[in-house]
Amino acid sequence: MCVVAHTAAPVPGLETKGEGWEDAGRGGAVVQTVRRARGRVTNEQRWRDTGLSALVLILLAYGWLFSGVSVPNERTRVYLTVALVDHGTAAIDAPMRRFGRVYDLAQAGEQHFTDKAPGASLLAVPLYALVRSWSAPEDWSIVDLSNLVRTWLMVPFGLAGFVLVRSLLRELELSEPAIDVSSLAFSLGTPMFHYSTAFYGHALVAVMLLAALRCLAAAGVLARARPARSAPNDGHARPGRFAAALAGAGACAGLAGLIEYQAIALGLVLALPILFAPGRARVVGLLAYAAGALPFAALLLHYNTSAFGGPFELSYQHLVGSSLQELHGFGLAGATFPTRESLQGLLYSQHRGLLFSAPLLTLGLFALPFLLPRFGVALWLVLTVASVYFLYIVASSSVWFGGWSFGPRLLIPIFGLLTLAAAAVFDRAARRPALQWCMRGAAVFSILYQQAVQASFPELPPSYERPWADAIGPMLHAGIVSPNLACKLWGLERSNLIPLAILVTVVLLIVALRGAMQRRLLQAGAVLGLAALLCAALMSASPSIAPKEQAGWLRLATGWRASETRCLPP
């Protein structure tokens, strides 16, 4: 945790003028005109934060994948966790003999290893070690282990992402409506929602980047303006807290790199704001940041050496099977140069595009070049360089589409950063109600879409180019829903969606109406009407797969439902 010591002094270029939200200064910064000390949270805000966090937590925990679905990306990480706890080794040969061979695999000599970076598996070690303290290895099937880490590791991290986004948006002094709409859209209306419930590395990295930014804010290095000779504790943090906060930022960045190789470069990007600190504070800050990151860098180098024979030998250089080598065995983990196909797919395609799966974040991405006056150089550089880098590296990958998935899952690490940009745009549109209504409508649409996908099946084949028409709509129409909390009470039925629908309706009303003081009915009608039009356009698309293939998919899903082991009707 990063402790923040705020000052009540106004931020340069911002001023308060009566009620509502106004543009102030040449930078056009949008500021809340209800005067309050910077960063101070009122009791009303605390209660709202608590209530919304509880709502997000319930929705994250509500549904999960069918037990009959094997996800190699998750299994290979679980195998490493089991190997470390039960066998004291990083080699996963023993878990493979126990649970079966996995597709995502690396090999060194006669031993096999996960082909992923080890960070996510290491995070799961304390959890598995805890449950193993009162149980035997044979008590745990791979389904049970997958659900263990999904529920008790990933869901808490997903909730932490929601809390961190809200904290950062409040630190940026954005309006409460912008905070609510943007944070709910981030956690419930993007692929971050599903991958906060699945044992992948992307959501973990996204949360670590947000945590690192929060620590940088606590240190004061993200301030938009600072006197040339100010001390490191100038209005933000005392020297001890300054160093501690930057060490925390370095630790978060180091852990992100331990979880996903591609995030290592982001650790350097996150250090950029420290370069704007004055004189001695810059040196102290960089040393503290490096000290925080060093243990995780050392752990990764040690893992590489023990598993693959050298500190800079990555698992992608030791992949098993020609198909994996063709995907990842060249360039930087399979990344070379962006292609038009990958860029268009990541931005506009129905099954992997940012526009369809997270429309608010698309707006944030394209608005980044214009947000320098609002964010200041330090924060703007982090958001822009990190987003451009990750978009470049994913668009350069031979597997930019992410295999079986929904939306641009490989871009999830920067979703939190794009949310900050989208929230700033929302506030800049305060004098343009129609634009804000469109943003709210897009958020309502994306939340509905993500909830429908999660309620059916979120790990779709890459050939299903129109997810709703190809799989999601037909599954829901046939009454095939994923296992969920309600199915433990009355079996796996379509009626399980009723509690979900009630919870989602509450969220949508908050997104549609939050902060509307006047013309409430007009705003609600415009927002919900736009969302309905977007939903209708999505549902009117014809399938991209043949009827025979779609029928085969429904038979497969019906089999998953019939063999579900985690729904126990009374």
Image (cartoon, helix red, strand yellow):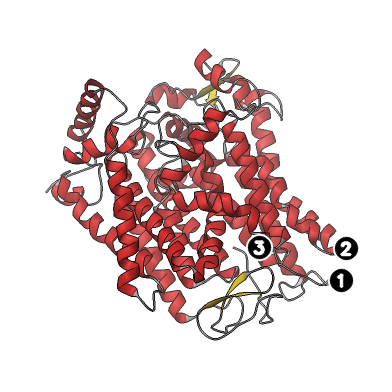
Cα separation, mark 1 vs mark 3, equals 21 Å
The residue located at (20%, 25%) in the rendering is 551
Count of numbered labels shown in the rendering: 3
**As drawn, 436 above or below 334:** below
Q: Nearer the viewer, mark 2 or mark 3?
A: 3
Cα separation, mark 2 vs mark 3, equals 23 Å
Q: Are marks 2 and 3 in contact (CB under 8 Å)?
A: no
The secondary structure type at the circle numbered 2 is: helix
The x, y position of residue 497, in whole percent, is 21, 51
Residue type at mark 2: give it.
Gly
> Which residue lies under the disc numbered 1?
229
The x, y position of residue 453, in whole percent, is 32, 43
The residue located at (68%, 74%) in the rendering is 25
> Which residue lies under the disc numbered 3?
375
Residue type at mark 1: give it.
Arg
**As drawn, 163 above or below 307:** below
The residue located at (61%, 40%) in the rendering is 390
Label 3: few (<14), some (14–19) or many (≥20) C-alpha neighbours in 10 Å = many
**As drawn, 167 above or below 148:** below
* Nearer-N-terminus badge (2/1): 1
The residue located at (54%, 21%) in the rendering is 327
